[in-house]
Amino acid sequence: MHWRDIKRFLVGKPLETQQLESERLSKVTGLAVLSSDALSSSAYATEQMLLVLMLAGPLGTAYGLKVGAFILLLLAMVVVSYRQTVHAYPGGGGAYFVAKENLGTSFGLIAAAALLVDYVLTVTVSVAAGVDAITSALPATAPHRVGMGIVAIFVVALGNLRGVRESGVLFSIPTYFFVTMFALMLIVNVVHPFGYWAPAAAAAPGQPLRESLTLWLLLKAFASGCAALTGVEAVSNGVQAFRPPESKNAATVMVWMGLILGTFFAGSTYLAYRYNVLPVGDQTVISQLGHSAFGDSPFYYLLQISTTLILILAANTSFADFPRLASILGRDAYMPRQLANRGDRLVFSNGIIVLAAVAGLLLWLFAGHTSALIHLYAVGVFVSFTLSQAGMVRRFISRRERGWASRAAVSAAGATATGIVVIIELTTKFTEGAWISALLMALLVLAFYEINHHYTFYARQISSKEWQPVWPRKHVVVVPVAGVSKSTASALAYALLLSQNIRAVAVATNPEQVAKLQDDWDMWDSGVPLEVVISPYRSIVRPLLDYIDRVENEEKPDWLTVVLPEVVPARWWHNIFHNQTALAIKAALLFRPNVVVTSVPYHLER
Amino acid sequence: MHWRDIKRFLVGKPLETQQLESERLSKVTGLAVLSSDALSSSAYATEQMLLVLMLAGPLGTAYGLKVGAFILLLLAMVVVSYRQTVHAYPGGGGAYFVAKENLGTSFGLIAAAALLVDYVLTVTVSVAAGVDAITSALPATAPHRVGMGIVAIFVVALGNLRGVRESGVLFSIPTYFFVTMFALMLIVNVVHPFGYWAPAAAAAPGQPLRESLTLWLLLKAFASGCAALTGVEAVSNGVQAFRPPESKNAATVMVWMGLILGTFFAGSTYLAYRYNVLPVGDQTVISQLGHSAFGDSPFYYLLQISTTLILILAANTSFADFPRLASILGRDAYMPRQLANRGDRLVFSNGIIVLAAVAGLLLWLFAGHTSALIHLYAVGVFVSFTLSQAGMVRRFISRRERGWASRAAVSAAGATATGIVVIIELTTKFTEGAWISALLMALLVLAFYEINHHYTFYARQISSKEWQPVWPRKHVVVVPVAGVSKSTASALAYALLLSQNIRAVAVATNPEQVAKLQDDWDMWDSGVPLEVVISPYRSIVRPLLDYIDRVENEEKPDWLTVVLPEVVPARWWHNIFHNQTALAIKAALLFRPNVVVTSVPYHLER
């Protein structure tokens, strides 16, 4: 068929289940595969923090270093705390698992909802920021912001539907390319300060302040900058992917990642402060720093390309994480079961499609503006941080293994810090978008419970344990006759195979039709008499339903089958010319117990 | 059911076919019923003509009287010519009939397409102009232009779905109310010229001209003013509705209508010229003439109300004409047959719904602006005028009855004049919207042929004339088993009623399931063995199709039935949790000959 060919071309041929195995990662490749999401935050975290501070003018941006220092401290706490999770859960310690196991199902589901929302936003924000890197280098492309973003999401989704292997090489190249270019940019700027410095748009001194410098504004800047921490948890989810000793390697990679991310964030924040770089005009902060280091040389463009690539890689990470979590929730009957089915290519195709659709919708709704989307972001991730670490505290306390007290203290400190961030995120950015994330999480949790309830009830209802079926005996078949034609004959022929007890019935809207109809019918000599019902209201469906009621009352069958001819036209849109009455009959009988409506296809040649 | 209750409330209870009869009209009521569309044109025709002329400034508007005179001449020609049609076709002489009978099917279909397009535009233009009358009186309502129009279309459509009888009283009141108010306005303005004259917005003398006064501009103004003639054909369609002598009464009413319409158009054009009234600002020409006659007194508001009412009545006329023509085309197999079915309330419900949807869409697309819509209008009506009169010429010539030559000459003159108008409409307004009408007509004619071709072919294909059915003998039933549960049991139970030859098959994605499945199955003791197929690709559908192929090859049945359990959840949206695989199986088997897929409903309680 046509559609299948297209699918095969785009997605590739099916794979066998046995092909499902994964290569084990070394520390170097593990860093590449699992930290692209975290490292990519360096591309926008400083900028988002400054965007808030600059509302208070130079007085505000002067606080950049101090706010940045708090974010660095938070990063260090989370990294140290998550190393403990890595050691405690060598099988992979996602927030859903950790919270469910230690705090109970409800908290597990809240963590799961937070993560799902966060994965969607990782895609949207990363793609939007990746597009920013392109439009900074090539301002002429700015009007196509949303289009470019949608294409990027589509391509990444397609790659994942084909089943992108998380192969070391594929991920290592862009990750280390980005790390190299970003490090080079920082070094050149430090060694040759103001080398090519030509500010894209310096803040005009007399520019009116839009907000005064308050604690509220600083907290809001802090909340925006906390986007730097998104993705830090990825290593703890992927412990199993490392070569043995898994936990030890993962913990080491966690520290490497923390150090690189911390350096990049600190470095770009310091340089932005020193150069008084502001995210004004059509240039991102990183693009401006790139210009000041490399001028307009190819190195600048390599930096921008590497930034775009790592951001798309970060989006790609969510395309592995979201479907995986959704499939676990599907298996646990908290989401529709289709999400738990691996498609032909061994990937969770439905989850990939849902993620791409929702992320694309958000990108379109927010016109691809990173600074608008950022207000929705990070709430989810910090909720999951908090619940995961709180779960760890509970675990340490209940197990009381050696050194439990200090470990519990570390996790408790982390949980407290990230919990405070959740409150800051929600209060300072609630009206600007955080409410959307909170609402989505709440709705998801409600949906989880509703779905679980439905599946539980359904399983109980269809379970045949300690139950023996009673096989029915009596069957009546009703054949509605619209006219004497080949399609009617095919329905009658089929009905003759089903039962000895067949009732053929025609609804006549005009009494004059009856005699001719009977004559034509009798010519067939089928042995089935034709009953004719007159309908004064021209309705076909109502008199037919009344007739079926009568048959049911007279015969009291175990099952009653209505056999309808269904014209299958050669072109799909020809359906508008056929089967309207059949559809109405089906709809009317859908909720009748022990009634089956069967369509006997009659294929038109063209 | 819920939906049926809402429908009953809105539309009313069903009516019997015998209730289909119509009252016969006197000349006075006949005028009211059949000329609201024509008379209502006086509300906007002068204005649309002036809107073009004023592009050339005062020099242009000075030509108003001359252009108007040509339009009056054309009106007289069409009225005289159509009186002949009324006499020749006492059964009703719609353009489709006349053209089809005398010029052949192709021209009949072109006329039909022209009329359908015209009926849609009558609704849109009349409603838009009716809304103009309201916004002229109450400028604050102007921003709600489109909303008010959509509501008006919805209300008129609903009234027609209920089955508004074309009762004399219902139509006489607004029609004669409008005739009275409009006549009063003309008289007062003539008797007391400049009584309350305060021009809404006189053209500033120094205003730059946007176009120079060319023949092209005059032709364009003429084309716009020709909207005055729309609806004139209504009487000729409705001859049968008159009391005997039908043709004579209809011919008289035709003249009355022509005289009133001519007087109104001439009067308002003359007054606009004399007062130098221009359609500027938020006041229609008629509203300004109303102000000059009545000032701000209640009479002014009565004039505006009566204008709105007659325009809505004009739209209402199309709600009778469009579904009637569509039903004739449906009966003749040029449009989908559903259009030929009378609904519960004896009206052609589908045609009404289609008309309301298309007219509403156009209104929305053109933001309710009468002057934009007018460019699409009138093309259709003049095409049908031309074809109808050309048909009459052919008829007179071929019959050669007494006086045929002079009659043919009258019709030929009319056909020529209206044919020239078609060319003027198409050339002067092609790029401004006439192309849309022309394109729609062309597409409709193509669709008529395509649909007719399909139905003809279909009828031939299912015809059982000189054909004797062969009753089949061999039947195999395949029951796909997803698991041992009550829903599976209900499918199996049903299958046991259908045939002795049942093949139950389970697709296992995991070899470990097989033994348990077999044990559970055997507990039921149904006498049907369970075959298990292993699917290494996790796909359920593909192995099942392969199995069905195998069964067909082995057994070579006349018919093969696949019996699937179908979970019917208590809430419709729960469907997302169920029956996904069943849907895929049905889709895959849709085009297989001699295969029936039957769903056995299993009703969930909640």
Image (cartoon, coloured by chain):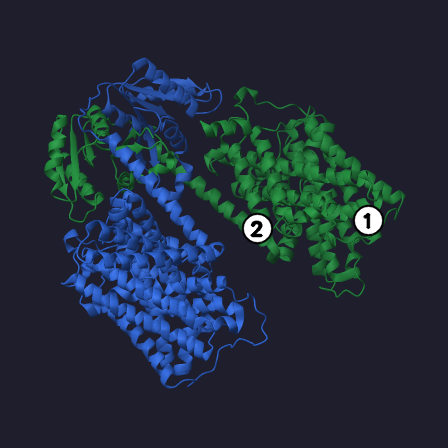
Chain colours: A blue, B green
**Which residue, as the protein is rendered here, is positioned at the far right?**
B192
Query: Which quadrant would residue A383 be assigned to in this image?
Result: bottom left
Question: Of helix, strand and loop, which one carries label 1?
Answer: helix
**Amino acid bearing label 2:** Leu
Query: Which quadrant would residue B243 be assigned to in this image?
Result: top right
Within-10-Å neighbours for mark 1: few <14, some 14–19, many 20+: some
Are marks 1 and 2 in one subunit?
yes
Q: Estimate the x, y position of residue A150 in percent, counting from the top left.
A: 40, 60
Circle 1 or circle 2, nearest the eye: 2
Within-10-Å neighbours for mark 2: few <14, some 14–19, many 20+: few
Q: Which residue is pictured at 67% across the width and 47% down the height? A: B418
Q: Which residue is pictured at 73% across the width and 62% down the height? A: B214
Q: Which residue is pictured at 42% across the width and 75% down the height? A: A287
Q: Estimate the x, y position of residue B527 in percent, counting from the top left.
A: 12, 26
Front-most of residues B251 and A534: A534
Q: Which residue is pictured at 47% across the width and 34% down the height? A: B338
Q: Which residue is mark 1?
A: B270
